[in-house]
Image (tube, rainbow, N blue to C red):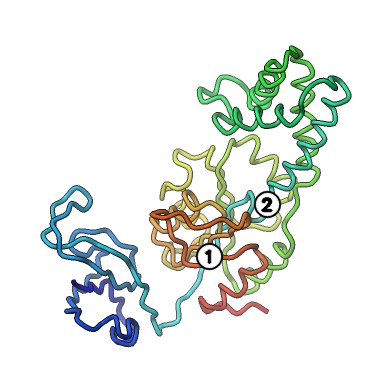
Amino acid sequence: MHAVQSILQSGESIRPLSSILGQKIVGLRPKCNVHTNGFVDGRVLRPRRLAIFYAREEKVKISGKDFKGLEVMGEVPVLSTKRRNVGGVFFDLDDTLVLTHQADTAAHSTVLELVKVRFPQVDRSVLLKSFIKKFVLHAWDPEHKVEVTQWRAGLWGKALEEQGVVNLDLAREMQDVFDRERLRSFRWASGVEALVRQLHAQHMKVGIITNGHPVVQREKLQACKASELFDTILVGGEEPNSKPHEDIFLKACGLAGCKPEESVMVGDTLTTDILGGFNTGFLSTVWVNVHNEELPPGGPKPDHIISSISELENVLKQLGVALN
C-alpha cells in the first residue's frame, strides 16, 4: 500500500502523516509525490488542495491511461495552518436561497382545487403524479419551438387526457394559476438577506448561479428582487454551458472579480452545484441538504453539509470568515 501526498501550496504547513492516520499508518510505506500543477501520477486533482490518497497495488486504468500498481482508494483532506481568504460566495437559487419545493407544493394545491371544482371526477393525486413525471422528463421544449408556459400547459393537458378530460383552456388556466401562486410565495429563506448583507460588509462578492429556463428563472429572480441583493446573477439557460460545466462558474468569478480558489459554492444539488464547484477548483463546496438525503456512493462529496442557509455562518467561520 502507498499513501500519496499531493499539492503542497507554498507557505502552508501540514500535520505529520502519523498524527492524521494514527495507528492506520502502521505497515504503510509513505510515498510522497509533491506536485503544484494539480496532477498526481496522471490523476487530475483539485488545485491548491492538500490531500492524502490511499492506493493499492494493482494494474489499473485511470483517465484512460495505464498505471502500474496504483489504484486510488480514497482521499483524506489535510488541514492547512495557513488562513484561507474567501473572496466570493456563490449560491444556487432553488431550494438553496428560496425553498422552491414549498412554493411548488402550495401552487400545486391551488391548481388541484381548480380541477376539483371543474372536474370532480378526476383523481387529482394521479393527475399531479402524471404531470410531474412528464415535467421531469422535459420541463420545456427541448427544441425551443414552443414557449415554456404553453409547453407546461400542454403537459397538464396530457395528464388530463389520461383521465378522459380534453380541455386545453383548462390546462392553460392551470399553468397560469401555478405560475401566479408560486411567484406569490417565492421569497428568500429565513436569514438569507441578513447573511448576504453581512458578507457584503466583509467586502466579499456574492452571486447566484442557477440552472433552468431563462424566462422561468428570471421571473423567480424578479419576484424576490435578487438584483437588489446580489452582485452577480447567471442563469444556465442563458449561457452556452450550464452547471456543472466549469465555464459558468469561471464566468461568475470573472464578473464578480474573484478567483475560483478563493470562492465558495453553496447549493442543494450534488451533480450540478457541488460537482461544478469542485471541478472548477473552488476553495470549498457546501451542500444544502434541504431534503435530508444520504450522500450517494460514488457521487460528488461536498466539503461541508448543512440543512439550511441559516447554518452557513458556522461553515464560513471554519473558512476564516467571521460575520458580525
Gap in Å between the C-alphas at discs 2 and 1?
A: 16 Å
Q: Nearer the viewer, residue 214 or 181?
A: 181
User: In the visual, does 149 lie left or right of 322?
Assistant: right
Do the residues bearing badges 2 and 1 touch, measured as CB atoms within 8 Å? no
Locate residue 111: give its quadrant. top right
| Location of residue 255 in the rendering, given as x and y in whole percent from the top left corner | 51, 55
**Quadrant assignment, res 200:** bottom right
Q: Nearer the viewer, residue 145 or 306?
A: 306
Q: Quadrant of residue 55?
A: bottom left
How dense is the environment of label 1, judged by Cα within 10 Å: few (below 14), some, or many (20 and up)? many
Task: Locate the N terminus and report the quarter of the image it occupies.
Answer: bottom left
Residue at image position (53%, 65%) is 88
Which residue is found at the position 73% from the left and 32% from the top? 125
Eyeballing the image, is 30 above or below 184?
below
Q: Is residue 109 above or below residue 85?
A: above
Q: Residues within 10 Å of mark 2 (few under 14, many from 20)?
A: few
- Residue at numbered disc 2: 227
104 above or below 161?
A: below
Quadrant position of the C terminus in the picture: bottom right
- At label 1, the amino acid type is Gly
In the structure shown, which secondary structural element does the residue marked by tag 1 occupy?
Answer: strand
Q: Position of residue 208 (x, y in %)?
A: 59, 53
Q: Residue at 19% x, 59% y: name it.
A: 42
Q: Amino acid at mark 2?
A: Ser
- Say what secondary structure mark 2 lies in: helix
Rendered residue at 53%/78% (across/down): 318
**In this rendering, would 168 be left or right of 81?**
right
Residue extending furthest toward the left: 68
Residue 267 position in % (x across, y down): 56, 56
Q: Which badge, 2 or 1, is on the more N-terminal residue?
A: 1
Residue 48 in percent (x, y) is at 34, 69
Give the labeled residue for mark 1: 88
